[in-house]
Image (tube, rainbow, N blue to C red):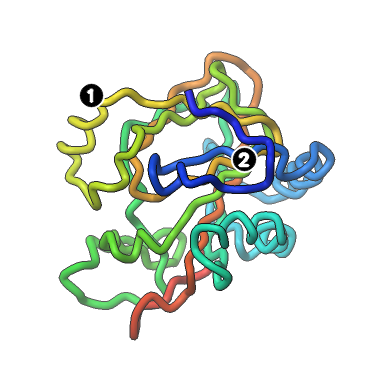
Amino acid sequence: MLQRDTSLKIGPELNERGFFITENVVSAAECDAMGDVLSRIPRRDGRAGLRHLMRFPEIAALAHDPRLLALAGQTLGPTAIPFKATLFEKSSTANWAILRHQDTALPLETAFEHPEWGPWSVKDGLAYAHAPAWALNRVVALRLHLDAATGENGPLHIVDGSHVHGVLSDETVFRLGRERPAATCLVGRGGVLAMRPLVIHASSKAKTDAPRRVLHFEYADRLDLAPGIRLALA
């Protein structure tokens, strides 16, 4: 199990293992306030979360909070900028398991044709493409836990060091997941799990009615990844 860190930093384990936990990034009162903001956002029936949250000022402000920018900047440099915010919420009424996978799709301002990018999809009006490794290596995700992730409420399980292999086929993802042990990421309320998009991860079903709300922010070193390729705010 990954050892927790109680200082506001990201250790070298993020690059070595693909993930790192920093505890006590935001306070319980701030978690409560953000929970109130999220509770007022309409959602479709049956949705166990919300996507494209950067359009909400309070959430965009949190993504730009100096504490989160500092964490992202330790990996991406001083130009680190948030471009995507998603809520994942497990509860007694919205409970699911996610199979082992990598996060390879990025939101883009315009669609284009390039052999490295695709397949494409559209989510709530935004174009997404599966990206090459060079682009995904310029991204880090910060998962802010509004509730503690315990062994009972469906925490994330990460295959240690699997991000170094680049973009993998589904068959290779499942094979590596079977062959290598996965670390269970237990994170306290207000803590942050930083992770590389290409690290193989999965999530189990919750075994308790206790909620597990996670705000998943994605940061890049800059929005313009290459000429004609610009990340969209999502």
Residue 40 point in image, percent of width and height: 74, 48
Of badges 2 and 1, the one in the foreground is 2
In the rendered view, would you say 158 is above or below 51? above
Residue furthest front as drawn? 12
Q: Which residue is depicted at the point 47% across and 74% down?
A: 223
User: Which residue, given by chain and number where applicable, does mark 2 sit on?
Assistant: 22
Write down the residue under mark 1: 178
Residue at 51% x, 27% y: name it.
Answer: 155
**Closest to the observer, 100 or 182:** 182
Q: Position of residue 126 (x, y in %)?
A: 43, 66
x 42%, y 26%: residue: 183
Q: CA distance from mark 2 to mark 1?
A: 28 Å
Question: CB under 8 Å between callouts 2 and 1?
Answer: no
User: Circle 2 sits in a helix, a strand or a loop, which is it?
Assistant: strand
Number of callouts in the render? 2
Q: Is residue 5 left or right of residue 165?
A: right
Give the percent coordinates (x, y) of residue 38.
70, 47
Three-letter code, disc 2: Thr
Q: Secondary structure at mark 1?
A: helix
> Which tag, 2 or 1, sits closer to the chain's start?
2
**Disc 1: CA contacts within 10 A as few (<14), some (14-19) or many (>=20):** few
The residue lying toward the viewer, choosing from 83 and 119, is: 83
Residue 81, percent across and down? 56, 68
